[in-house]
């Protein structure tokens, strides 16, 4: 199969490994779509499908239509009841993908949209093995810039003394809520958060104060994000406290990996993936300047100021 073969769509690297069909439109009238399937992966029967155009340059493969027709994955003529008014013509190359197929979840869509911007819809230059690691770099970048992006409420069991540590999977302490007693089921006094420099000025020698099971302050130091302190220090039988933690999301290893952030982070992910791809490309004209533009867009998507904006602010002072 080559890209010049007009009867078989080029198989993009962003399709899921299974549960899809590819072929040409035989006819489309009203809400009835007939497709001659010439390539497929899988054998199961499904009643929920997404319909995509073949990813030829300049043509989107996003959002052509959907169907709830029961069909088994296979070759030959397949009929789908879909929406009226779709821009589909006889002979057009299309994909029909199980609607819950992994490659078309949020992660898959990020990859497809990034590939379109890179004009590499078939993944010949930047395949999944390249772009998926870029998404993981995006996750790490966001966790550094906006720890609250992947936050969870969790009880922490304290240890004796003032010095405490976050759980191994926690990236940062976003906030503290209240005392939870020795069992972690009884809400007690609220806890205030304070920076270590301020606490040192407010209560000199606070780390050596008499131990008390009721925590009044959680003391943080931005230089040691995995460590925090409590005041008063904890006794030999310490308590639990309720916290809001920023935790490390599970790395994405394939196109069916779960994107851990909510939908508001999708535009930033697309721009970041494009920026990283262009930044490491030496054969395209102006690749680095384009990478800088997309990296600035990524920062703006997150509501952050770019380096140029910060420089302009400094000039304006």
Image: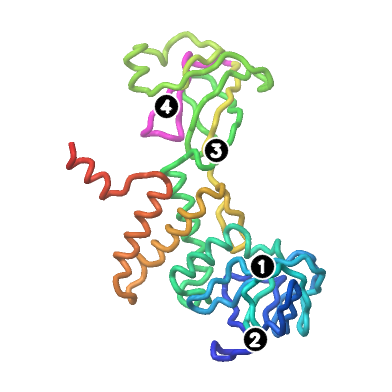
Q: Tell which tag, 1 or 4, sits nearer the viewer.
A: 1
| Residues at marks 1 and 4 touching, judged by CB atoms closer than 8 Å | no
- Measured in 3D between alpha carbons, the distance from the residue under mark 2 to the one under mark 4, in whole angstroms, is 64 Å
Q: Tell which tag, 2 or 4, sits nearer the viewer.
A: 2
Q: What residue is disc 4 on? A: 220
Which residue is at the front of the view, 201 or 211? 201
Residue at the image position 76 percent from the left and 83 percent from the top? 75
Name the image quarter holding residue 78: bottom right
- Measured in 3D between alpha carbons, the distance from the residue under mark 3 to the one under mark 4, in whole angstroms, is 17 Å
Q: Position of residue 118 (x, y in %)?
A: 43, 70
Residue at the image position 58 percent from the left and 18 percent from the top? 179
Q: Tell which tag, 3 or 1, sits nearer the viewer.
A: 1
Of mark 1 and mark 4, the one earlier in the sequence is: 1
Of mark 2 and mark 3, the one earlier in the sequence is: 2
Q: What residue is disc 2 on? A: 91
Q: Left or right of 40: which side holds 169?
A: left
Magenta-highlighted residues = 219-236
User: Is residue 136 inside the magenta stretch?
Assistant: no
Of mark 3 and mark 4, the one earlier in the sequence is: 3
- Measured in 3D between alpha carbons, the distance from the residue under mark 1 to the one under mark 4, in whole angstroms, is 51 Å
Q: What residue is disc 1 on? A: 65
Which residue is at the front of the view, 120 or 234? 120
Q: Left or right of 228: which side holds 168?
A: right
- Measured in 3D between alpha carbons, the distance from the residue under mark 2 to the one under mark 3, in whole angstroms, is 49 Å
| Residues at marks 1 and 2 touching, judged by CB atoms closer than 8 Å | no
Q: What residue is disc 3 on? A: 151
Of mark 1 and mark 2, the one earlier in the sequence is: 1
Secondary structure under badge 1? strand
Q: Tell which tag, 2 or 3, sits nearer the viewer.
A: 2
């Amino acid at each position: 199969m080559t890209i010049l073969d007009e009867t078989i769509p080029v198989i993009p690297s962003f399709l899921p490994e299974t549960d899809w069909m590819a072929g040409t439109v035989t006819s489309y009238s009203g809400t009835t779509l007939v497709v001659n399937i010439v390539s497929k992966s899988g054998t199961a029967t499904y009643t929920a499908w997404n319909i995509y155009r073949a990813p030829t340059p300049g043509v989107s493969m996003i959002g052509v239509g959907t169907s709830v027709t029961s069909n088994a994955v296979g070759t030959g003529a397949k009929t789908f009841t879909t929406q009226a008014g779709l821009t589909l013509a006889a002979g057009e190359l299309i994909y029909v993908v199980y609607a819950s197929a992994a490659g078309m979840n949020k992660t898959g869509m990020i990859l497809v949209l990034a590939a379109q911007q890179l004009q590499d819809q078939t993944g010949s230059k930047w395949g999944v093995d390249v772009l998926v690691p870029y998404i993981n770099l995006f996750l790490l970048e966001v966790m550094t810039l906006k720890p609250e992006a992947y936050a969870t409420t969790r009880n922490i069991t304290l240890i004796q003394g003032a010095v405490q540590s976050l759980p191994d999977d926690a990236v940062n302490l976003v906030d503290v809520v209240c005392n939870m007693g020795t069992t972690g089921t009884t809400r007690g006094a609220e806890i205030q958060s304070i920076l270590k420099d301020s606490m040192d000025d407010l209560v000199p020698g606070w780390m050596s104060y008499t131990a008390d099971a009721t925590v009044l302050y959680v003391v943080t130091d931005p230089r040691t994000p995995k460590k925090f302190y409590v005041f008063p220090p904890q006794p030999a039988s310490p308590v639990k406290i309720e916290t809001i933690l920023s935790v490390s999301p599970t790395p994405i290893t394939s196109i069916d990996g779960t994107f851990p952030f909510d939908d508001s982070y999708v535009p930033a992910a697309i721009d970041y993936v494009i920026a990283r791809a262009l930044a490491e490309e030496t054969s395209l004209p102006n690749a680095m300047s384009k990478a800088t533009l997309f990296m600035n867009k990524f920062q703006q998507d997150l509501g952050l100021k770019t380096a140029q904006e910060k420089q302009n602010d400094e000039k304006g002072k």
